[in-house]
Image (cartoon, rainbow, N blue to C red):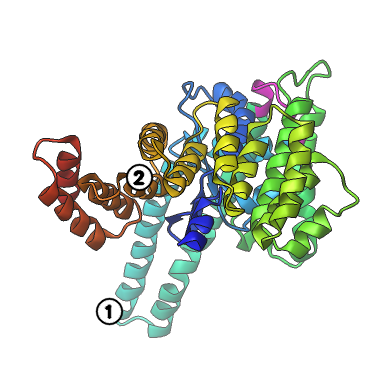
Amino acid sequence: MHKILVILLCVFLAVPARAASLINDTETERVLTELITPLADAADIPAGRLRVHIINSNEFNAFVMGGEDVYVYTGLLTQIKSPDALQAVVAHELGHTLGGHMAQMADRMSAEMTRTMLIQALGIGLMAVGGDPSLGAGVLAGSSGVAQQSMLAFTRDEERIADDMGLKLMIRAKLNPNGFIDVFEQMSHMTGALESRINPNRINHPLTAERLSNVRAQIDKMDASYTPSNAPTADQRAEYELVRAKLVGYLDSAENVTTMYPNSDTSDAALYARAIAHMQMGNLDTARDGTMTLISRNPENPYFYELLGDIEYQLGHYDDSVNAYEQSLKLTDNAPQIETALALVLTERNASGDRDRAIALCKRSLLSAPAPMTYWVLARAYGDDGRADWARAEYYHMMGREKQTREYARRAQKSLQPGTPEYIKAGDLLE
């Protein structure tokens, strides 16, 4: 059981999301939200409505859904080295939203399907009236190709428009438009050799060289007096480096961590990545030493105390773990993942008052960010109480396991008083 709890305590609480998984981490979400907020303001997204989601995938990708939910892949975060470039990627994705491209894409796909069916009908008609059967077959064979080429041309145009709108959005937000150059130069290094052998009419994005040339031409035309007054500060750049190091430490191999952050690198980011990697490998004393160095350098950073809490817990030092998490929460606010981690340690320590404190922490966490892990910890905190069955039902519901959801919801209703909040919520799950 202790080994299972150690795994669950890991700061990255993965939640199934189709083929990939979502990562919940207070530090990463806050840093990205702060960097993206100027773009949201420039795009007239109401304050507080923008939500950042992190997808655990090596893909160099990001997208926006509904105009307010920004999904960023860990592969993008670990490879994009400057926050300006990250802002450019998000600006491009918001450009699609501002241009109404998703709705236009649906309309265009509908139109192309109609056109394809008309061409196919023409082919069938040619054969039916006694025309050359090979002519009709040729029309049929080519119909889907015509639609495909039209759709590819359409999406290439939309990508160009999104680049243009994204660049304008960066300027409106008073950010550094050279972030676009950084992104396309990096993409060119990654795919340049491959793109030289690609037919530009057979892909859904313009070639990177074309996109890079276009943004350079637009930036060259900008007013020389333009000042990116909202560009990331030195502190924000340092925070972004820490987030990248954190992701590498948790998600990459120890060998890659050492390559990216060799022992000769004594920066905070390098210490952070190596401390996390050592914790992942079970080198807990080494991980603790590195984390203590970080805390001595940055006594006001809540996330270094969070890491210390993780390490102390795995060492079996429950009191020290609780103290570290409590210090982390003192230095930050609205940190649901840290609250859940502390609640988990409290249920394991199980001293007087620990379970009540764990229940309170879980309830507070669920108010701001409902998560499966929090319901799982809440069930542990409730113990033999019937409310534990309700919490397990909520956990399984969020995990998409409906059989177990119904099983525990029925068990909850059998043991809870009718009319209590948990009884009613269990009934909602059954319905």
Q: How many marks?
A: 2
Of residue 232 and residue 387, the one placed in the foreground of this image is 387
Quarter of the picture containing the N terminus is bottom left
Residue segment shown in magenta: 170-179
Which circle's residue, 2 or 1, is located before the other in the chain?
1
Cα distance, mark 2 to mark 1? 73 Å
Q: Measured from the top left, where is residue 232 in percent x and y? A: 73, 27
Q: Is residue 45 magenta?
A: no
What's the amino acid at mark 1? Ala
Most extreme residue toward the left is: 418
Q: Which residue corresponds to mark 1?
A: 128
Front residue of this view, candidates 305 and 133: 305
- Closest to the camera, between mark 2 and mark 1, is 2
Relative to 124, is 224 above or below? above
What residue is drawn where x is 61% and y is 60%?
203
Q: Is residue 313 left or right of residue 106?
A: right
Residue 214 at least partly seen: no
Residue 352, by quadrant, is top left
Q: Is residue 361 visible?
A: yes
Determine the image quadrant of residue 89: top right
Closest to the observer, 26 or 103? 26
Q: Residue at x 15, y 40 (%)?
A: 424
Q: Residues within 10 Å of mark 2 (few under 14, many from 20)?
A: many
Q: Residue at x 50, y 43 (%)?
A: 341
Instruction: Provide residue 60's location: percent of width, then percent of height.
Output: 65, 53
- For disc 2, the marked residue is 381
From the viewer's side, name the closer residue of 112 and 420: 420
Q: Image check: 84 left or right of 405? A: right
The residue lying furthest to the top in this view is 225
Q: In the rendered view, does 301 fall on the left or right side of 178?
A: left
Name the kind of residue labelled 2 in the image.
Answer: Ala
